[in-house]
Amino acid sequence: MGIGAATYWILAKELRTELRTRELLHTTVVFVLLVVVLFSFTFEPTREESRRYGPGLLWLALLFAGSLMLQPAFIREQNNDTLSALRLAPIASLAIFLGKALASFVFLTVAELFLLPIFAALYGVAILPVLGEILVVLALGTLGMVTTGTVFAAIGVQARMRELLLPLLLLPLLVPVLIASVSATASLLALEPSMDWTAMKFLIGFDVIYLAASALLFEFLLED
Amino acid sequence: MHRNGSFRFELSGTLAVAALMGVAGYAVFFLAPTERTMGEIQRIFYFHVASAWTAFLAFFIVFVANLNYLMRRRPVWDQLAVAAAEVGIAFCTVVLLTGPIWAKPVWGIWWTWDARLTSTFVLWLLYVGYLLLRSLVEDPGRRAVTSAVFGIFAFLDVPIVYMSIRWWRTQHPEPVIAGGEGSGLDPTMWRVLLVCLMAMVALLVLLLRQRFRLEQLRGKLEELRLHIGAKPTPRF
């Protein structure tokens, strides 16, 4: 089977398992909502302050959600011992990585689409005029998150205390993604919206570097 | 085994490093000129910068060892990696402690979120994560592979973190060494810094050797215990 077809089947399998229970989606959506509400208690969300802190808390919520939701996808495989089946399947390990990462990308994007209007309403920021650009920023940042997160989830599944371990490994690594995404989002939500091209190029660079590194190194993590 | 000879070699090596440290200390306090604006406190610079460069060297060794382990699968590379990571964290901790001690009297604050401070802090967190990961994976083979992959990811992140903070969160002093126009270091200061750097790198080699040998002994012990069917030793 070619890599494309294998990736498609892994992705389809991930989506099908998730849609049966929707556990991950539900918990992630509730979690991001909770974080956004809790943040509002740490400062007075006036218009001015929302504009200053809004992008940062949006991305922090997404980062925390990502670091929590990426691990279960692998733990599920291990509990049912389907990871060995995946290993034995005559497909490239790259396809397993791509399928899993794409599935997480879909789940996180769904959570983001759900969060975005609520965030805009609660914090009084005008998102509609720059919706397209915001979605591009979200996609680039999320891609960086799921790329590194999928590799680290494959690492974490082999360790003890794995639910706690993933955020500890992932969050410091994602500092650059956080900084660049927040900067890009902040300039889009400013009074005079503009595109932070440096941040966009930076995010693309991060995504490319870690996609390449993951493609090269992921197979080592599947060995038995 | 040449027990005695090896002991004498270790002892003389340790004494040589201690002597070099003494020379560096003397140079810092008595040979280096006093800086015009900052005064005596600036002397911490020699230990601060030398430790920083030594920490980077140690983390680079971790990276090379990680790559070699994945390609060659010899346990020595894993043992070298963990030894270098631990010693590197020690040097990095020195940097993070001497920094605020220097900053307080000069800038008036203990900490500022500037590019070099913040990226050093993130670097420290990444390698603490590396050791944490190692302590949580039981099987030696898996521990070596997973931590090698993480180590490579972490090392790739260092320049990216630095650039991201430098571009978006700058408020830091211009680099003095290899900076732009008007920056530069007094020749005597340079020489003292080099002596300090030599002393720190010698200390790195000494600590790395000891830690590496300890890790090798641990590996052997683990093998023997597995051989007789005992439970593996808990790791820290």
Image: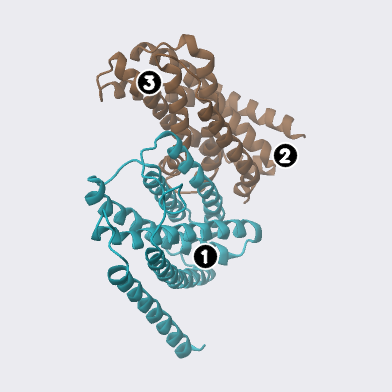
Chain colours: A brown, B cyan
Q: Position of residue B178 (x, y in %)?
A: 47, 52
Residue found 40% across the figure and 23% down from its top: A55
Q: How crowded is mark 1: few (under 14 residues within 10 Å), some or many (20 or more)?
A: many
Between the C-alphas of marks 1 and 2, the distance is 34 Å
The residue where tag 1 is placed is: B80
Q: In which quarter of the image is residue A38?
A: top left
Residue B85 higher or lower than B156, as above or below: below
Both labels 1 and 2 in a single chain:
no
Please tell me the numbered disc located at residue A91. Answer: 2
Please state the horizontal and vertical placement of residue B74, each as a whole percent of the image: 61, 65
Q: Cα distance, mark 3 to mark 1? A: 45 Å
Q: Are marks 3 and 1 on the same chain?
A: no
Q: How far apart are marks 3 and 2 (CA)?
A: 38 Å
Question: Which residue type carries mark 3?
Answer: Leu
Q: Residue B150's spot in the image, x, y percent? A: 52, 49
How many numbered marks are there? 3
Amino acid bearing label 2: Ile
Mark 1–mark 2 contact, CB under 8 Å?
A: no
Residue annotated with mark 3: A33
- Taking the spot 29% from the left edge, 59% from the top edge, the residue there is B35
* Element on which disc 2 rests: loop
Please check whether the numbered discs 3 and 2 fall on a single chain. Answer: yes
Give A80 or A28, whichever is nearer the viewer.
A28
Quick one: SS at disc 1? helix
Q: How crowded is mark 3: few (under 14 residues within 10 Å), some or many (20 or more)?
A: some
Q: Mark 3 belongs to which subunit?
A: A
Please state, as top left, top right, bottom left or bottom right, where the C terminus of chain B lies in the image: bottom left
Q: Is residue B214 above or below residue A217?
A: below
| Label 2: chain letter | A
B171 or B122: nearer the viewer: B171
Q: Looking at the image, which residue sits at the far front?
A: B182
